[in-house]
Image (cartoon, grey):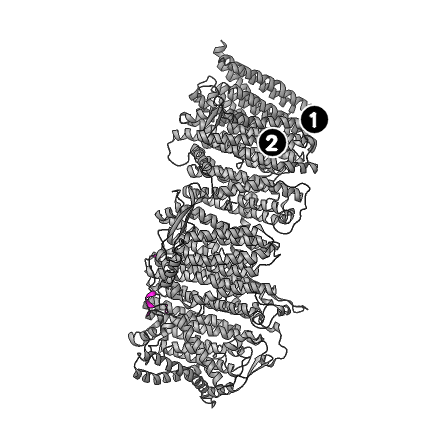
Amino acid sequence: MRERSTRAATLLVAINPLHATLGIAAFWLAIGAAGLAAPGSLRLASRVLFPASAVAGLLLAATALSGIFQPPTALVLPLGLPDLPFHARLDALSAFFLFLLGGVAAGVSVFAAGYLRQGEGTPPGLQCLYYHVFLASMALVLIADDAYFFMVAWESMALASFFLVTSDHRLPEIRRAGYLYLLIAHLGAIAILLCFGALQGGSGDYTFQGMRAMSHSSGWATLAFMLALVGFGAKAGILPLHVWLPEAHPAAPSPVSALMSGVMLKTAMYGLLRVSLDLLGVTVWWWGVIALALGLATALFGVVFAATQSDMKRLLAYSSIENMGLIMAGFGLTLLFRSFGMGTLAALALTATLYHCLNHAYFKSLLFLATGSVLHSTRQRSLGRLGGLIHRMPWVAWTALVGTIAIAGLPPLNGFVSEWLLLQAFLFTPGLPHAYLNMLVPVAAAAIALAAALAGYVMVKFYGVVFLGQPREATLAEAHDAGAWERIGLAWLAAACVVLGLVPAAVIGMLDPVTRMLTGFRIANLSHGWLFLAPIDPQRASYSPLLFFVITALLVAAAWVTVRLFYHGRVRRAAAWDCGFPYLNARMQDTAEGFGQPVRQVFEPFFRVEQHLPSPLDATPRYREDAQDRLWYWLYLPVARGVERVTGLVTVLQRGRISIYLLYSFLTLLVLLFLVR
Amino acid sequence: MLEHYGPQLINLLAAVLLLLAFAMLSQRRILSLINLFAAQGFVLFLSTALVAYLTDQHHLYWSALLTLALKVVLLPWILHRLIRRLNVKWDVETLINIPTTMLVGIVLVILAFNLSLPISRLAGTMTRSTLGIALACVLLSFLMMITRSKAVPQVIGFLSMENALFFAATGAVYGMPMVIELGVALDVLVASLILGIFIFEIRERFDTLDTRHLEKLKEL
Amino acid sequence: MISLSGVAAQFTEVMLAVLLAPLLTGWVNQCRAWLQNRSGAGVLQPYRMLGKLFQKEVVLAHNASPLFRIAPYLIFGCLALAAAIVPTLDIDLPLNAAADAIALVGLLALARMFIALAGMDVGTAFGSLGARREMMVGFLAEPALLMVLFTASLISNSTSLSTIVETLAHKAFAIYPSMAFAGVAFTMVSLAENARIPVDNPATHLELTMIHEAMVLEYSGRHLAMIEWAASLKLFVYSCMGLALFFPLGVARGGDWLGILFALPALAAKLAVGGFGLALIEIMSAKMRIFRAPEFLGTAFLLAVLAMLVHVLLEA
Amino acid sequence: MVLEMPLLLAAPLTGGGVLALVGHRRAAADINVLFSVLTFLAAASLTGRIIAQGPITVLHAQFFVDPLNVFLVTLTAFVGMTTSIFSRPYMRIERDHGRVSDGGMRLYHSMFQMFIFTMLLVLTTNNLGIMWVAMEAATLTTVLLVALYRTPASLEAAWKYFILCGVGIAQALFGTILVYFAAEKVLGPGMGSLLWTHLDEVRARLDPTIMSIAFVFLLVGYGTKVGLVPLHNWLPDAHAEGPTPISAVLSGLLLNVALYALIRCKVITDGALTALTASGPGAPFAGRLMMGFGLVSVLVAAFFLSRQRDVKRMFAYSSIEHMGLTTFAFGMGGPVASFAGLLHMTVHSLTKSAIFFAVGHAVQKAGTQVMQDIRGLLRVSPTVGWGLMLGTLAILGMPPFGVFASEFLILTTAIAEQPWAAPVLVLSLGVAFAAIFGKVQPMVFGDATAQRLPHRPALLPVFAHLAIVLVLGLYMPPYLAEWYRQAARLIG
């Protein structure tokens, strides 16, 4: 892989990857402007602009790939504040995330070319503008090298995605979702801003270079880290700032959900890594514990809620929360190892984290796009009204199957690799020089295993209810498969999932420069050939998905061939047997709620359940039960009420009586005069 | 001889001014309120003229005359016409009862004196002690504006505050430069004219001059 | 690292597993029969059943998708590979480098996922019910199994099964209290995973109780045969895993055919005893309500985590 | 002798006179625009001169132009011009609706010019006394405009505005007298001792006690006009009840100018006090007071926001919030914070006036100022809708608009230098965002209620302002940056 990638590098070394990235970002902005030029024209947007941006995405991925293996390059743009022009810099970390962005964006843009419709709230040209500003700002976030540039790009990203989320703004709930999203994003942004303020420590030097050079006292460092955790955590959907995510992702058009879930959440991880592993010199061990605990809590919370959803996009959104939790846990582990100076293990944990970022980007956007196709051809989002689509839309169904296996963390696809690496990292923790942590960690590993297993449950529910069984609505009969553009997008992402799963050694070769940059170490994998994944040494653990896959395939084939060889292949079609029950119909299948019921029972305390049981005399009995998020009632509503109360107190100041107003200024005067004396 | 008694005379006038301020604070009838205001203006005129004579600063004569014209003649006349046109004969009822107001006033005077001590220690002028009194007058008329609920008394309070400021200027620094005196005077004049207009408008719209009816704009 | 003898051993092991798995199932059923004072159908009954099913034609529901038809072969393939990974006769197995303990668990999970999806494919009430219950068992049993394997791998500092078994079998003859916890947990898990009483009853078609059977109701002919075969393979794999982890005596050191020749009877004996034990457990316990299953498996999970903690506290 | 200077002041003055004669003829609006343009041209050329040859004093040092006030002069002239352009159709519509009488129109146009004149006078004069006179005059000119509609509400608002600001300004006069009193000891009697330039030279020798007491009075006086809590009560009423162009200039210009006066006084006071207590970097007395008032204003205004029903009232409170933020920045002092404060003054006045323009049209379309009844502006008129949306996002500190740049600098400096203030700022900004955006979003998006209008709205000013603010957020021309730096150096 090293050879191949260096060959790629030599091929692309002619252009400086940083310039290329800036160019592509500019190109995306230009596409957006072009879309704005002809807001109403669907043909222009879908036939010209979006395919073009997909190509740009591919180029970005290629340049970023070459950039990973090149030394960092920096340049200063003639924009920004007078004493603080925009600094841009591209090092291995940025390059890796740019690679992620480019690859996913290519697939999503192609899909969007086929997905765009007339008359869905916002005109296509405007959507094109938002979409490409969104892409460009994400690229800029990744190459920003000073606080101001970073914040500008960061907030533009939030803004663009907000407009995309509310692109069908006639529906009040969508407006509400967008409002919640932007509010939390803004609060997070303020936290990040303050974090940078703490990092520059009054030196007035806002460049990342200056922050790196500074030595922070552990107090300031902790403050900065906590602010970063809050700020980026809000964007990553980490507990308890996750509430916007299950609202905003379903509200957005599916390609946007795919980008938000696949890439935007990762930019939050990028920021966290950048601040805590690059800008901050010091690491305090309990930061790691906090991040780990938050991550695990988020992962379990997310997956448990995903299991009880009945809207397919909400389900995926909650599953994104789960995956971000896993990533955050890996990040926490990295911090732990790093703070105890166990470089190689830190590198291992970091590798797992980054690998999972990459995987999640691909399979989650794949699944969101699949739901998009389903949504367009059936106009249904509720799992209770879908089913049996594998017959009507095979393309979507089979690509979605790939995504499903991948996200369930099953071999031989990519989801498994990162979870494998993560568990490996956990198995090393007993080496930590800290008794309590040693005991804590098995529990953490157990939590991760549980989350992974539950993810399998969730995905079986998702796939089984949407694509298998009998159609639950008559209208599903005329559901049509995805169009050509959409198929290309789906296929691209599915292929990526397979490749990432089958050649992990190559991917780790790509991650190597990043881990070396951030932790100073690399995991000793490449010495064992490209076929085997053996992060520490083969005695300790090794895994070869390719071999694994080939042999499974061989065994399956062998079984099939032998059966076919020795026995006849007679098949008869008949009505379903169903224990001889004659009046089988679609409503007898499990509903989504029914499928989630065991989880709801086992994890009772997670939920705030509202049940509505019909009376026995009810002619048309309706049974309703919805499980809500307790945090909403424990955190958000109290805060809102608090603000209300304070407002009530404040408004006493403005009661309309002029004498009182005069009294205020009189008293102010007297008080100040007292102060002076 | 006048030179000799000059400072005492000025202090005497200052005391009278303070007395008038208290009188206005405690005054219930609006007509006499206006008269008191005129009296205040007159005392102001006297003191200014005296200071002018003692320190032979010529521009102070001008401002003394200005005071006489504006604050003793013009403004009281306007106010008289105003209340005749609006035929408001009523007593001025206060938001806080008079004795309390007086007590607060005394506290304010003490505060003002304490506050002006360090300043007047620096003041090289013979009229050093007047600054404290001026400040006291400012605060007292402020208090008056707070305690009165009707529009006209508030206006009078506003104008008497202007007087006190003027007195401070003459007392402490032998008056501000002429240009500024003129500017201030002009502002005061225009202000009182506009206030007159407003009082008519308010009377017309709300058919009362009680500012307690001007409480529609507020936060709920 | 890939030696010819290794490949040979690997091949023999897979073949043996595939061929002998139904025998084990038959043996367990026979033991049950004896313990219930029945003269059972004989240990070869599973082979007869499979033979019969293979000759029968396949009856497919109208809306069965291709997935439904592929699933049996996939499941069979997965379990055959699982059987190949677990070191039963010999330690030096090439595939051990390809897949370690975690991969093994993943493999089993993959099989479970496909069987559950197949169960939901036709869209009958029974199918989806069975799938749901199977996944419910899965999401608790899987982490428990993983924890059991982790305990072992913490002891041997490796997740590669052969290294684990080698450590346990040959290197250090130590008493591992953690393994005791792990053993109990593993027994409970394997009962649940193999659709055994008290979690499931392989011999029922009663809606209230069945899990595995409910999923495969729609299968017939060779598909059903593959599924059943895979099921007995699963039992075989779990038994071998248990034996390898907890009674690793007699497993060959690798390479030498004598060792394997000696290991074969040892394995047979251990399987026979193990099967008898399973039958004993089954007849001595009653089928529990399906809603009790989470508690049962939760206990197993906690025991497994406890095993790890015990290891960290006492042995590390 | 500099020619721009007299032209700058003469243009609006004569404009006021002429318009008083022209009265309510249709031409009045155009003449208004004409004179505003003249003023702006004068200001622009004056700026050019300052950039070329640095600070200048005119007319026996009675007038003084340095980087600090020249950019405010330009800003004032510019916003005055755009406002006059905006008010051309706006006031016509108001008149067609019969809300304004002919006399009203006459009053409006001439008083508008007079107001601009007083603003420019406050900015350019070098004499603290004249500054006071002009500030009072500014109140007098605007108070009649606030009461333009002659409705009970507008009268009430105007009355409060007048009384509160009048009393406040009176305090400022006392403060000015004290300053004179202190200066006279050093510079001797006469006009000379009220000239800011002279005071600035000798500020270290002024008596600290008197200066601190004087500053208290000046703070209460000019602070009332800046709208610092708890002296702010007149502000929301006046903004909500006056005609929208007036709300725009009040928010965009008057508050700035009052703050400018306060800054001038602060410079001298701190000069005198630092001479007294050479207490290193920690902001001295005046600075601390300003920080305190700034924070209180930000916090209280933010909480006020979340209960508003009237759109203009809401944005008035937002002005209080931003003025508080600026005051806080100047209170902190130091090159970065002062720079940020100046930048914030600029972008706030541009953005806020743009918002008021958009709001004005929105209100005319919907026929009400109550926010629940204004819905789906995007459907009625996309330009107005987008103007309001973008303006709101800008004022809420969303990049890449310039407001974000200043808030960025203020916040980052605050947490580094005054960490205790950071939580307050975060809380306030969060609450303010939730309140304003939550109310504006449904006004712009969603389904429509309002209807179309006869006159085409003049949206050029809105987008011109927003464009400038946008540019300032992404790229600041070097000479502008140089201005700001010099001004920040003056403020210290």
The chain letter under disc 2 is: D
x and y percent of residue B194 in the render?
A: 63, 27
Query: CA separation, marks 1 and 2?
Result: 42 Å
Q: Residue at x 45, y 23 (%)?
A: D183
**Label 2 Cα neighbours within 10 Å, binned few <14 / some 14-19 / many ≥20:** some
- Could you say which is closer to the camera, residue C179 or residue D145? D145
Looking at the picture, does residue D113 appear above or below residue B122?
below
Which residue appears farthest toward the top when viewing the image? B1
The image's mark for residue B86 is 1
Q: Amino acid at mark 1?
A: Leu
Task: Find out whether residue A520 is within the magenta segment.
Answer: yes
x and y percent of residue B136 in the render?
A: 52, 25
- Could you say which is closer to the camera, residue A508 or residue A408? A508
Residue A79 appears in the picture as rendered = yes
Question: Dot 1: what SS?
Answer: loop
The reply to whether callout 1 and callout 2 are in contact (CB within 8 Å) is: no
Dot in front, 1 or 2: 2
x and y percent of residue A673 in the render?
A: 48, 30
**Label 1 Cα neighbours within 10 Å, binned few <14 / some 14-19 / many ≥20:** some
Residue occupied by mark 2: D34
Looking at the picture, does residue B19 appear above or below residue D373?
above
- Could you say which is closer to the camera, residue A588 or residue D365? D365
Q: Quadrant of the C terminus of chain A?
A: top left
Task: Find out whether residue C237 is within the magenta segment.
Answer: no
Q: Amino acid at mark 2?
A: Leu
Magenta stretch bounds:
A519-540
Q: Quadrant of the N terminus of chain A?
A: bottom left
B15 relative to A77 in the view: left or right: right
